[in-house]
Amino acid sequence: MPIPTPQHYNILFLCTGNSARSIMSEGILNHRAKGAFTAYSAGSHPSGTVRPEALHQLELAGIPTTGFRSKSWDEFAAPGAPQINFVFTVCDNAAHEVCPIWPGHPMTAHWGVADPAAVKGTPEEIERAFHDAFTHLDRRISLFLSLPLSTLEDMAIQREIDQIGRQ
Protein backbone atom coordinates (compact mmCIF):
# COMPACT_ATOMS: atom_id res chain seq x y z
CA MET A 1 0.00 0.00 0.00
CA PRO A 2 1.50 3.39 -0.95
CA ILE A 3 2.36 5.62 1.95
CA PRO A 4 1.16 9.21 2.03
CA THR A 5 3.77 11.58 0.72
CA PRO A 6 3.98 15.36 0.90
CA GLN A 7 2.94 17.49 -2.06
CA HIS A 8 6.13 19.49 -1.76
CA TYR A 9 9.63 18.07 -1.38
CA ASN A 10 12.92 19.66 -0.33
CA ILE A 11 16.07 18.33 -1.95
CA LEU A 12 19.64 18.94 -0.87
CA PHE A 13 22.46 18.47 -3.40
CA LEU A 14 25.82 17.90 -1.75
CA CYS A 15 29.35 18.19 -3.03
CA THR A 16 32.62 18.91 -1.33
CA GLY A 17 33.17 22.51 -2.48
CA ASN A 18 29.60 23.58 -3.38
CA SER A 19 30.99 25.60 -6.28
CA ALA A 20 29.85 23.84 -9.46
CA ARG A 21 27.92 20.53 -9.63
CA SER A 22 25.72 21.01 -6.60
CA ILE A 23 25.07 24.64 -7.58
CA MET A 24 24.05 23.62 -11.13
CA SER A 25 21.81 20.88 -9.68
CA GLU A 26 20.08 23.36 -7.39
CA GLY A 27 19.45 25.74 -10.28
CA ILE A 28 18.24 23.05 -12.68
CA LEU A 29 15.80 21.48 -10.23
CA ASN A 30 14.36 24.78 -9.02
CA HIS A 31 13.86 25.84 -12.63
CA ARG A 32 12.22 22.59 -13.76
CA ALA A 33 10.28 21.64 -10.62
CA LYS A 34 7.35 24.02 -11.07
CA GLY A 35 6.83 24.46 -7.33
CA ALA A 36 6.64 20.77 -6.39
CA PHE A 37 10.24 20.82 -5.19
CA THR A 38 12.66 23.23 -3.62
CA ALA A 39 16.32 22.47 -4.18
CA TYR A 40 19.21 23.56 -2.03
CA SER A 41 22.93 22.90 -2.31
CA ALA A 42 25.78 22.75 0.14
CA GLY A 43 29.29 21.42 0.62
CA SER A 44 31.20 19.53 3.27
CA HIS A 45 34.13 21.93 2.78
CA PRO A 46 32.65 24.84 0.82
CA SER A 47 35.06 26.75 -1.40
CA GLY A 48 33.40 30.06 -0.57
CA THR A 49 32.89 30.94 -4.24
CA VAL A 50 30.63 29.76 -7.04
CA ARG A 51 32.44 28.94 -10.26
CA PRO A 52 31.54 31.44 -13.01
CA GLU A 53 31.56 28.58 -15.53
CA ALA A 54 28.74 26.88 -13.58
CA LEU A 55 26.72 30.08 -13.58
CA HIS A 56 27.37 30.45 -17.31
CA GLN A 57 25.89 26.99 -17.98
CA LEU A 58 22.78 27.94 -16.02
CA GLU A 59 22.50 31.21 -17.95
CA LEU A 60 22.82 29.38 -21.28
CA ALA A 61 19.84 27.22 -20.23
CA GLY A 62 17.77 30.28 -19.30
CA ILE A 63 18.02 29.56 -15.59
CA PRO A 64 18.31 32.54 -13.22
CA THR A 65 21.66 32.75 -11.42
CA THR A 66 21.05 35.30 -8.67
CA GLY A 67 21.41 34.30 -5.06
CA PHE A 68 23.77 31.34 -5.42
CA ARG A 69 26.50 31.06 -2.81
CA SER A 70 28.90 28.39 -1.64
CA LYS A 71 27.76 27.22 1.80
CA SER A 72 28.30 24.51 4.37
CA TRP A 73 25.99 21.55 4.80
CA ASP A 74 25.92 22.49 8.49
CA GLU A 75 23.28 25.10 7.60
CA PHE A 76 20.88 22.29 6.73
CA ALA A 77 21.50 20.25 9.88
CA ALA A 78 20.88 23.21 12.17
CA PRO A 79 17.64 23.92 14.04
CA GLY A 80 15.20 25.86 11.88
CA ALA A 81 16.59 24.51 8.59
CA PRO A 82 14.12 23.25 5.99
CA GLN A 83 13.07 19.61 6.44
CA ILE A 84 14.93 17.73 3.69
CA ASN A 85 13.17 14.85 1.90
CA PHE A 86 16.00 13.82 -0.43
CA VAL A 87 19.79 14.18 -0.22
CA PHE A 88 21.82 13.60 -3.39
CA THR A 89 25.60 13.61 -3.42
CA VAL A 90 26.90 14.65 -6.83
CA CYS A 91 30.61 14.08 -6.31
CA ASP A 92 32.66 11.13 -5.15
CA ASN A 93 34.27 12.86 -2.18
CA ALA A 94 31.01 13.86 -0.52
CA ALA A 95 29.58 10.37 -1.08
CA HIS A 96 32.29 8.87 1.13
CA GLU A 97 32.21 11.47 3.88
CA VAL A 98 30.24 11.10 7.07
CA CYS A 99 27.19 13.28 6.59
CA PRO A 100 25.32 15.02 9.37
CA ILE A 101 22.21 13.32 10.70
CA TRP A 102 19.38 14.91 8.77
CA PRO A 103 16.11 15.36 10.67
CA GLY A 104 13.35 13.18 9.24
CA HIS A 105 15.77 10.64 7.70
CA PRO A 106 15.53 11.71 4.04
CA MET A 107 16.11 9.33 1.17
CA THR A 108 19.65 9.48 -0.13
CA ALA A 109 21.42 8.62 -3.36
CA HIS A 110 24.77 9.17 -4.98
CA TRP A 111 24.80 10.69 -8.45
CA GLY A 112 28.52 10.79 -9.20
CA VAL A 113 29.40 13.39 -11.83
CA ALA A 114 32.92 14.20 -13.01
CA ASP A 115 34.24 17.42 -11.48
CA PRO A 116 34.43 20.12 -14.15
CA ALA A 117 36.27 22.42 -11.74
CA ALA A 118 39.19 19.96 -11.70
CA VAL A 119 39.71 20.15 -15.47
CA LYS A 120 42.86 21.90 -16.58
CA GLY A 121 43.32 22.88 -20.18
CA THR A 122 42.20 25.35 -22.76
CA PRO A 123 39.17 27.54 -22.15
CA GLU A 124 37.30 25.35 -24.66
CA GLU A 125 38.18 22.17 -22.73
CA ILE A 126 37.06 23.72 -19.46
CA GLU A 127 33.84 24.98 -21.05
CA ARG A 128 33.20 21.49 -22.44
CA ALA A 129 33.70 19.91 -19.00
CA PHE A 130 31.15 22.26 -17.43
CA HIS A 131 28.72 21.69 -20.31
CA ASP A 132 29.08 17.90 -19.95
CA ALA A 133 28.47 18.06 -16.19
CA PHE A 134 25.44 20.31 -16.70
CA THR A 135 23.99 17.97 -19.34
CA HIS A 136 24.55 14.93 -17.13
CA LEU A 137 22.85 16.58 -14.14
CA ASP A 138 20.00 17.92 -16.25
CA ARG A 139 19.28 14.42 -17.58
CA ARG A 140 19.28 12.86 -14.10
CA ILE A 141 17.07 15.59 -12.67
CA SER A 142 14.62 15.21 -15.56
CA LEU A 143 14.43 11.47 -14.87
CA PHE A 144 13.93 12.11 -11.16
CA LEU A 145 11.14 14.59 -11.86
CA SER A 146 9.35 12.00 -14.00
CA LEU A 147 8.96 9.62 -11.03
CA PRO A 148 5.39 9.31 -9.73
CA LEU A 149 6.50 10.02 -6.15
CA SER A 150 3.00 10.37 -4.73
CA THR A 151 2.08 6.81 -5.74
CA LEU A 152 5.25 4.95 -4.79
CA GLU A 153 6.27 3.38 -1.52
CA ASP A 154 9.52 4.46 0.17
CA MET A 155 11.46 1.37 -0.94
CA ALA A 156 10.29 1.68 -4.53
CA ILE A 157 11.24 5.37 -4.59
CA GLN A 158 14.70 4.54 -3.23
CA ARG A 159 15.23 1.86 -5.92
CA GLU A 160 14.17 4.30 -8.66
CA ILE A 161 16.46 7.05 -7.34
CA ASP A 162 19.37 4.63 -7.10
CA GLN A 163 18.72 3.53 -10.69
CA ILE A 164 18.83 7.14 -11.89
CA GLY A 165 22.18 7.49 -10.12
CA ARG A 166 23.60 4.64 -12.21
CA GLN A 167 22.53 6.20 -15.51
Image (cartoon, rainbow, N blue to C red):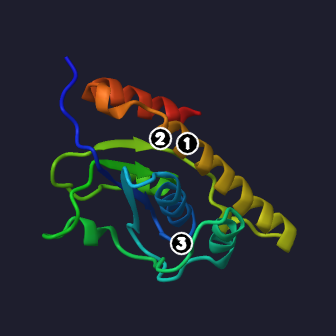
Q: x%, y% of residue 42? A: 39, 67
Q: x%, y% of residue 94? A: 43, 56
Q: Residue furthest left?
A: 79
Dot 3 or dot 2: first in sequence order is: 3
Q: Label 3 is placed on what type of residue?
A: Ser
Q: Are marks 1 and 2 in contact (CB under 8 Å)?
A: yes
Q: Nearer the viewer, residue 39 or 162?
A: 39
Q: x%, y% of residue 31? A: 52, 59
Residue under circle 2? 145
For numbered disc 1, what is the local secondary structure?
helix
Q: Residues within 10 Å of mark 1 (few under 14, many from 20)?
A: some
Q: Residues within 10 Å of mark 2 (few under 14, many from 20)?
A: some
Left or right, residue 44 beside residue 30: left
Residue under circle 1? 142
For numbered disc 3, what is the local secondary structure?
loop
For numbered disc 2, what is the local secondary structure?
helix
Q: Label 1 is placed on what type of residue?
A: Ser
Residue depicted at x 35% and y 33%: 149
Residue depicted at x 59% and y 33%: 167
Disc 1/disc 3 C-alpha distance (Å): 21 Å
Give me the disc on residue 50: none
Residue depicted at x 72% and y 66%: 60
Residue under circle 3? 19
Q: Quadrant of the N terminus?
A: top left
Q: How many circles with numbers are drawn on the protein?
A: 3
Dot 1 or dot 3: first in sequence order is: 3
